[in-house]
Image (spheres, rainbow, N blue to C red):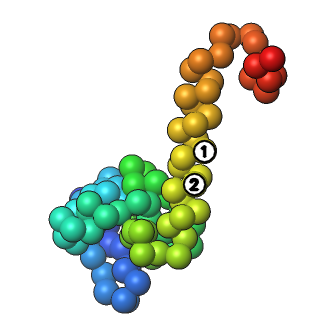
Amino acid sequence: MPPEIRVTLPDGSEKRVPAGSTGADLAKAIGPGLAKAALAVRVNGTVWDLTRPLPDGAKVTIITDKDPQALEVLRHSSAHVLANGRAATVPPGEDRLRSSD
């Protein structure tokens, strides 16, 4: 594995970060404000969470609340949180889709 990877940002500039860096690491390397505002990353056109390691040579966009796709990302993430919370409250073997009548 190379010691660092190269990613291309939306403005066409390249950023070098250590191999194994995540979207969160990239945002932090660009600036603390962006790191705080980051919701997800778009890697080669596909939305990824911030914890996934970036591939070498990828085109990367940091998604913040200013991005048109931000609401979709937040809704998707919220659905996972809700489903995980619901799954944690249902005893094993019970029908998870049954109403609570």
Specify the amino acid type for callout 2: Arg
Q: Give the CA separation, mark 2 to mark 1.
A: 6 Å
* Residue placed most toward the observer, 51 or 67: 67
- Label disc, if present, on residue 75 of the rendered structure: 2
Residue ID at (55%, 28%): 85
Residue sitting farthest toward the front: 101
Q: Circle 2 sits in a helix, a strand or a loop, which is it?
A: helix
- Above or below residue 85? Residue 51 is below
| Residue at screen point 27% across, 76% down | 15
Q: Left or right? Give the position of 36 relative to 62.
A: left
Q: Position of residue 62 (x, y in %)?
A: 39, 70
Residue 94 locus on image (x, y percent): 75, 12
* In the displayed structure image, the side of residue 72 where residue 20 appears, left or right: left
Q: Which mark is residue 29?
A: none
Q: Are marks 2 and 1 in contact (CB under 8 Å)?
A: yes
Q: Position of residue 93 (x, y in %)?
A: 74, 10
Q: Amino acid at mark 1?
A: Ala
| Residue on which the image places disc 1 | 79
Inspect this view and state whether residue 29 appears.
Answer: no
Q: Quadrant of residue 56?
A: bottom left
Density class for disc 2 (Cα within 10 Å; few <14, some 14-19, many ≥20) is few
Q: Nearer the viewer, residue 46 or 16?
A: 46
Name which residue lies at 53% across and 49% down.
Answer: 77
Element class at badge 1: helix
Q: Does residue 11 appear in the picture of this structure? A: yes
